[in-house]
Image: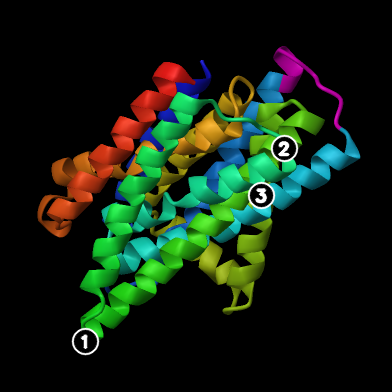
Amino acid sequence: MGFFFAALTALCFATSNIMIRKGMKPESKDNGMLMTVFINAIFLTIAWLIYRFFFVAIEITLIGLIVYIVAGVFTTFIGRVMLFQSIRQVGPSRGTAIKNSAPIFTILFAVMFLNESIKFLPFLGMLLVLSGLGIQGFYMVRHTSKASMENQLLRTGYLFGLASAIAFGVGQGVRKLGVEHLPDPFFGAFISATVALVLTLVMEGRKGDIVDRIKQQYQTINYYFVIAGVFTSIAVLSFFLAMMFIQVSYVSVIVALEPILTIILSKLILRKEEVIMPYTIVAACVVVAGAIMIVSFG
C-alpha cells in the first residue's frame, strides 16, 4: 500500500502542475498559490474531521503538533511557493524535474536523523533516479550557459526549482518524524494545509489589501487553480499515508516519478504550450527505471 500511495502522490502532483500552468495568464501575476491553499485547507480539514470522528481518534501530542507545523512550513509553503515560481519561468516539466532532486535531501535527512537503512538493490534504484536527475541538471546548466535575457530567466527558474527541492526534501523527512511522534496521517496533512494557508495569507497581506485579493479570487474563480488545489490535497494526504507503510526514503524517490507523469500530461493537455526536450525524456525514463527497482526490491 505504501508504494501505491507514493505513486498516487506523484500522479496527483503532476496533474496539479499542469492545472497550475493552464491557469496562469501572462498578464496576471497570480500563480495559483492563494486559491490552492484555500482548497487544501477546506479539503484536508474535512478529511481529518471525518477520519477523527468516524474512524480513529488519535491523541494529539504537543511535540507531534510542533513537528507537523515545521514540516508544513518547509513543504506546503516554502516548497510550493518556489515550485510555482519555477513552473512559471521554465514550465512544469523542467520545473518539477529540478524539484525532484528532493529525494537527495530526504535520504540524507532520513539516514542522519531517522536511522533509516537502505537495502542494496533499492539503493541501486535510488542511484538510477539520482542519475536521471543528474542528466536533466547537466543539460539545463549547459543550456543556460549562454548569456541572454531568455536564458537568464531560465536560470532564475532553475534556482527556484532547486530551492523547492531543498525545502521539500527536508520537509518530507520532518513529516516522517511527525508520523513517528503522532501517527495520524490525516492530522499531519491537515496541519500542513493550515500552516500553508496562514503563511500565505501573511505573505499576500504584505503586498496590499488581503481582503480585496480574497474577494478577487472568488469573484473571478480560476477553475484550473481549484482543480490544482484538489489534486494537491490528495497528493499531500497520499504522501502521509505512504509513510505509514514504508520508509520516507523510498516514498520520496517514488514520488520522483512526477517528471515523467508531468511530461505525459503536458503532451496531452498543454500541447504547444510546453516544449519537451529529448534530454528531459531520457532523464525521466531513467528516473522511472530506478523507481521500478525500488518498488520491486524495497
Residue occupying image coordinates x 47% and y 56%: 218
- Magenta stretch? 52-60
Q: Is residue 295 positioned above or below 229 on the image?
A: above
Q: Position of residue 206 (x, y in %)?
A: 63, 77
Q: CA distance from mark 2 to mark 3?
A: 18 Å
User: What kind of residue is marked 1?
Assistant: Ser
Residue 54 among magenta residues? yes
On the image, numbered disc 2 is attached to which residue?
A: 114
In the rendered structure, find residue 199 and report the number of the disc placed on it.
none
User: What kind of residue is marked 2?
Assistant: Leu
Q: CA distance from mark 1 to mark 2?
A: 44 Å
In terms of sequence position, does the residue under pointer 2 or pointer 3 come before the other? 3
In-front residue for pair 8/215: 8
Residue occupying image coordinates x 44% and y 52%: 101
Question: Mostly what secondary structure, the magenta segment?
Answer: loop
Q: Is residue 202 positioned above or below 14 on the image?
A: below
Residue occupying image coordinates x 12% and y 50%: 271
Q: Position of residue 142 (x, y in %)?
A: 24, 71
In the rendered structure, find residue 72 and report the number of the disc placed on it.
3
Q: Are marks 2 and 3 in contact (CB under 8 Å)?
A: no
In terms of sequence position, does the residue under pointer 1 or pointer 2 come before the other? 2
On the image, numbered disc 1 is attached to which residue?
A: 148
Residue 75 among magenta residues? no
